[in-house]
Amino acid sequence: MTEQDWQNLVSSQVRDNQLYLNISYQLKPQDAQKFSIALSNQTTLKLLYIFSNNNQFQDQGISFLAEKGLKNLLNLQELYLDLSENGFSEAGATSLSFGLGQKLKILELNLFSNRIGDTGLRNLSKGFEQNQSLQKLSLILDQTSLSGQAISDIGSSLQKLPNLQGLKLGLSYNNINDQGITKFGKSLELCQNLQSLNVKLEANQIKFEGEQNLSKSLKNCSQLRTVDIQLEFNAVTIVQRKLFNQMLMKSNSLIKYQVVSVIPM
């Protein structure tokens, strides 16, 4: 597609300052550049949904998208961005942080199966924490080469979002440990308006100590009403998991909770 083709495609899909676009066509960095230039002209957009999974944007393409496209959308309030399986690393995640603006109320990023690592996530977190009006945050980060330090860094950024009410994190198949999940829990205690929490932590390195510390922190989240935690395939016994459930049940604020666990053989 030429640059003019992208301009025509993007402009034809805009309705009431909203743009929904599926561009999962095995695109490469040069395609991302053309698309980003077309996107940059839509300066009145308030909602943007881009479904761009399984392309090959790589670091260069993500940089184009963030700095030539998203960075110019100063009125954007809702951003839904699926960049799963796009072959980028921490450099791409860092570039993406510069395109997240400062007026977002809802942010959903799917970065599944990109090698962003701890440094990439730390830099990305610095981007979304600038949105002080953010109310709902969803980060899908399964299989992204993260350690316990990464979830600790997410927690530190969450503390800087005073209006955050809903949080969804996909962190399965990483290397998150007890220390990381404990620090994350402590950060959640400082999210005074958090009402809904959904966290997927399957197949990490979390043991009973980490789960126990997390449950203690959740009990201290006074506004939290619903909790959904996925903990399959971590190193916790059946008896220990029952204790974890019992601790959550004792929370006075929770009206709904779910802990899903499959004990590894």
Image (tube, rainbow, N blue to C red):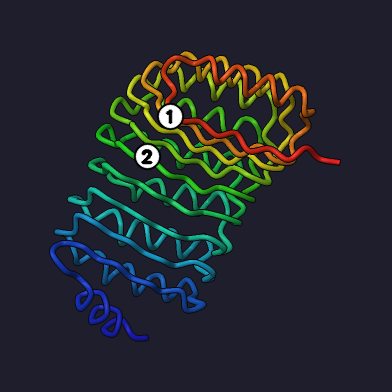
Q: Give coordinates of residue 45: x percent, y percent.
A: 19, 59
Q: 232 or 112, which is in the foreground?
A: 232
Q: In this view, does 99 lie above or below 60?
A: above
Q: Give coordinates of residue 156: x percent, y percent.
A: 47, 25
Name the residue tied to disc 1: 157
Quarter residue 128 falls in = top left
Q: In this view, does 261 lie above or below 51?
A: above
CA neighbours of label 1 inside 10 A, class few (<14), some (14 to 19), many (20+): some
Name the residue tied to disc 2: 128
State left or right for residue 51 relative to residue 261: left
Q: Is mark 1 on a helix, strand or loop?
A: helix
Q: Give the quarter of the figure containing the N terminus.
A: bottom left
First in sequence, mark 2 or 1: give its number: 2
Q: Is mark 2 on a helix, strand or loop?
A: helix
Give, as a three-letter code, the residue at label 1: Ser
Give, as a three-letter code, the residue at label 2: Phe
Q: In this view, does 217 lie above or below 61?
A: above
